[in-house]
Image (cartoon, grey):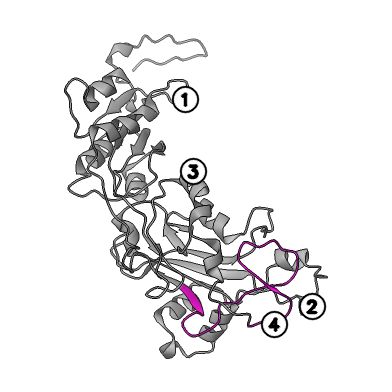
Amino acid sequence: MAFQVSPGINVSEVDLTTVVPNVATSIGAIAGGFNWGPVLERISITNENDLVKVFGKPDDITSSWFHTAANYLAYSNNLLVVRNVEASAKNAVVGAVPGVAAGTAVVTHNATDYDADVGSYTDQLFVAKYPGVLGNSLRVVAVDSVGWDIAQGKTPANRSADEAKFIANFDARDPGTSNSMANANGWDGVEANRPALYDEMHILVIDEDGAWTGEPGHVLEKFAFVSKASDAKRIDGSSNYIGTVLRNESAYIWLGAKLTITADSTDAGGGAPDRDAGGVMAGGAFKRLNGVGKEIIGGSLGSDAGAEGADDNALTDAELKDAYDLYGNPEVVDVSLIMAGPSDAGAGGTGQHIIDT
């Protein structure tokens, strides 16, 4: 081995023709059918675990697309994925009172769709974030101060399964009136003078059937002290409104029709006029969840007829082309390699469309 006995310059000649370029510097792209995830939206995936987390595990219909993507990720960490679905795919929902006020399944593909669709929701309390039967495994429940106090007042043996999960997953302080709501209504900061406005809620998202985790009843997400008020703020200035929090932070659910939160509630707190969820904080108390079977709202998504989520992932060439078109503008997205799952390779088919793209 050569070495120098005094400071100096050592010149080495290296043959770079034997070096294999790092595949990870290439950007791959694929479009196809998957069991979960946003529809017609480019999503960056870096590993197979993220692929499963965002787009779900494969089945017989989605296997080719999924495993093509997974095989690429075994050698690289930069893949763009676009999901598309056929017309029969639906998002699972739950109504205000499952079994009585059942919700109607909807078709909401992504966040842009949700922003456009939420105003037209009517009987949906919570909506699975994306189309597919995976949404039917979700249970979403919410509680405010009434249900929390009832649960705390029971012995552990007498609590319902939902009550037990709330007590186990949240701190001792019950949801009541948020600082944001109190301040907007003239609170002086003295705890004893905090107004009784009852805007806070706790929310649990549960893998009821085990389709997500293999563990029925596993808590997937929890959201503490979110507000029924549309203009409620957290201490950092971000929105604390239940609809906005779920939109931006939940991987599984949207808020449905906002008035279903309090539509079947009564004012157990007295005071000034009630207001519905999403009202502006200008005084008065929110309705509280109170009444037999209404201390905890929500339930199992897709449990009622007409509320079920549905798969429809056997894509036609036209639907595949729509998905691959999201890679068509190099000014917007730059990819090095476009991959295909099952598709028509003939003239005018998806294979030729990919080549043209």
162 up-or-down from 114: above or below? below
- Horizontal and vertical percent position of residue 109: 40, 46
Give the residues drawn in magenta, as a range.
Answer: 268-297
Residue mark closest to the camera, 1 vs 3: 3
- Residue carrying label 3: 112
Amino acid identity at mark 2: Asn
- Residue carrying label 4: 270
Describe the element under mark 3 as helix, strand or loop.
helix
Distance in Å between CA atoms under marks 1 and 3: 18 Å
Describe the element under mark 2 as helix, strand or loop.
helix
121 up-or-down from 294: above or below? above
Q: Earlier in the sequence, mark 1 or mark 2?
A: 2
- Residue carrying label 1: 332
Labels 4 and 3 touching (C-beta < 8 A): no
Q: In this view of the protein, which residue sits in the foreground, 290 or 164?
A: 290
Q: Which mark is residue 193?
A: 2
Question: Number of labelled discs?
Answer: 4
- Residue 245: within the magenta? no
Q: Earlier in the sequence, mark 1 or mark 3?
A: 3
Where, quadrant-wise, is the N terminus in this rendering? top left
Distance in Å between CA atoms under marks 1 and 2: 55 Å
- Residue 294: within the magenta? yes
Q: Crowdedness of circle 1 by 10 Å Cα count: few (<14), some, many (20+)?
A: few
Amino acid identity at mark 1: Val
Q: Earlier in the sequence, mark 3 or mark 2?
A: 3
